[in-house]
Image: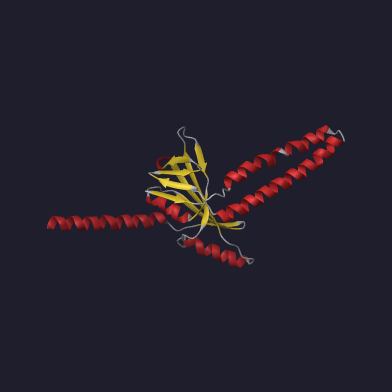
Amino acid sequence: MEKKYYPNLEYNKSKRRTGLILSILLFVLMAGPASVFVATKQYEFALFFGVFLIFPIFLVPTIIKNYPIKNEPAVIIKDKEIYIDKINAKFKDVTMINVTIELPSSKLDSENNALLEKVKTEKPENVYFGNLDIVWKDANGKKRVLYSHIENVIDALETLLSLGLKYYKINFTIRKKSVICEYDFRKEYALQKEKTLQSTSVKNRRKQLL
């Protein structure tokens, strides 16, 4: 079995554009005083501001990497392994799946609170895009995290759970507020497994009787 999940391109384009604009503004903001201090031969102050010029330069590659705008799979689940950004983690090494979904906000706090209370207990629908972060241990036993932002994030989570992964957390956020979803997918899969076993048992009994 192989399943592929793609990024939300419109979201990524918006985030990448915002990040690049902020990086450029930060660079200009730091470059202005630095050039003034160089012109007035106040090199200590120029060096101080010059150091801060490094940050926006280093931010640009990170922004481009975190918000891809090509229609290519961001997550591939295949043969008990998950591939994110060309790095693969084996299921046996995965310790936690973290899903974060940002909900649309209202101007009224009461409506935001009501929506958070609603999604807290209900089974999440497969209409969301959000973060799918995989916590795992590499060959050296070091804890690592694979980050992704994909469409149909709940379907990706259900696929991983159906293939044997157990530990997960779904976090819904609106602005600065958040709740952890209390719906338990593991009970759902346990019931499905029990029904499958019961059905298999009935079929075996029929064969024996025949």
44 in relation to 122, above or below:
above
**Between 101 and 81, which is closer to the camera in this rendering?**
81
Image quadrant in which you'd find residue 88: top left
* Residue 70, position as x, y percentages in the image: 54, 49
Q: How is the image coloured?
A: secondary structure
* Residue 16, position as x, y percentages in the image: 62, 50
Q: Is residue 49 left or right of residue 202?
A: right
* Residue occupying the far right of the picture: 40
Picture residue at 81% right of the left edge, 33% below the top: 44
180 in relation to 24, above or below:
below
* Residue 178, position as x, y percentages in the image: 57, 57
* Residue occupying the far left of the picture: 210
Image quadrant in which you'd find residue 31: top right
The answer to whether residue 161 is seen in the rendering is: yes
Q: Is residue 143 left or right of residue 197?
A: right
Q: Is residue 22 left or right of residue 187?
A: right
Picture residue at 44% right of the left edge, 50% below the top: 4
The answer to whether residue 160 is seen in the rendering is: no
**Between 139 and 95, which is closer to the camera in this rendering?**
139
Label tally? 0
Picture residue at 29% right of the left edge, 58% below the top: 195
Q: Quadrant of the C terminus?
A: bottom left
35 in relation to 166, above or below:
above
* Residue 79, position as x, y percentages in the image: 38, 44
**Between 18 and 103, which is closer to the camera in this rendering?**
18
Picture residue at 38% right of the left edge, 56% below the top: 187
41 in relation to 66, above or below:
above
